[in-house]
Amino acid sequence: MKQALILLALGGTLALPALAEPPKMMNGMAVDEHGMTLYMFDKDSEGTSVCTGGCTENWPPALADSYDKAMGDWGMITRDDGKKQWTYKGHPLYRWSKDKKPGDKMGDGFKGMWHTVKP
């Protein structure tokens, strides 16, 4: 703590970790803080994710940081591994591993069970 105060007194700044932004609606669909498309899985029930184990290799959960707060339609659930996952209107959110850049939505309609999240 003393070192931080000395650094500040000398005109330096402390590098703090950047806070991730919560998901948002953009261009008619839900996206993460990097603009990557977010998806829902039909087999999930409200407030519960059944995409676990190998499923998460292709469909990584949209995880929330410890400092994130639920707001409006955006909420969180606690996964089986104890991590927090973003939800939209109670439905857990995921990314698709084959989407490579913002705006990609190659997972939409996958096996008839994965869908982009729309307002």
Image (cartoon, helix red, strand yellow):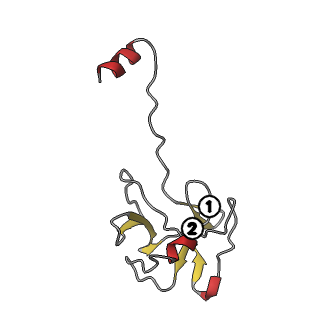
Bin the neighbour count of mark 2 within 10 Å (Cα to Cα): few under 14, some 14-19, many 20 and up. many
Q: Quick one: quadrant of the N terminus?
A: top left
Q: Which quarter of the figure is the C terminus placed in?
A: bottom right
Which amino acid, mark 1? Met
Task: Report which quarter residue 30 is drawn in.
Answer: bottom right
Res 25 quadrant in image:
bottom right
Rendered view: 6 above or below 69? above
Few, some or many C-alpha atoms within 10 Å of disc 1 (few <14, some 14-19, many ≥20)? many
Q: Earlier in the sequence, mark 2 or mark 1?
A: 1
Q: Which residue lies furthest to the left in this view?
A: 1
Question: Mark 2–mark 1 contact, CB under 8 Å?
Answer: yes
Q: Residue furthest top?
A: 10
Which residue is more in the foreground, 97 or 86? Answer: 97
Tell me the CA gap for discs 2 and 1: 7 Å
On screen, residue 45 above or below 60: below
**Residue 70 locus on image (x, y percent):** 38, 60
Q: Is mark 2 on a helix, strand or loop?
A: loop
Which residue is more in the foreground, 21 or 118? 21
Instruction: Identify which amino acid the numbered label 2 is placed on.
Output: Arg
Q: In the structure shown, which secondary structural element does the residue marked by tag 1 occupy? A: loop
Q: Which residue is depicted at the point 36% across and 15% down?
A: 6
71 above or below 1?
below
Q: Residue at x 45, y 39 (%)?
A: 17
Q: Is residue 118 left or right of residue 68?
A: right
The mark found on residue 95 in the picture is 2
Q: Could you tell me residue 26's position as x and y percent?
A: 62, 60
Q: Is residue 18 visible?
A: yes
Q: Name the residue under label 1.
A: 36
Residue 83 percent across, percent down from the top left:
37, 63
Residue drawn at (45%, 73%), measured in percent from left and top?
A: 92
- Residue 117 in sight from this viewpoint: no
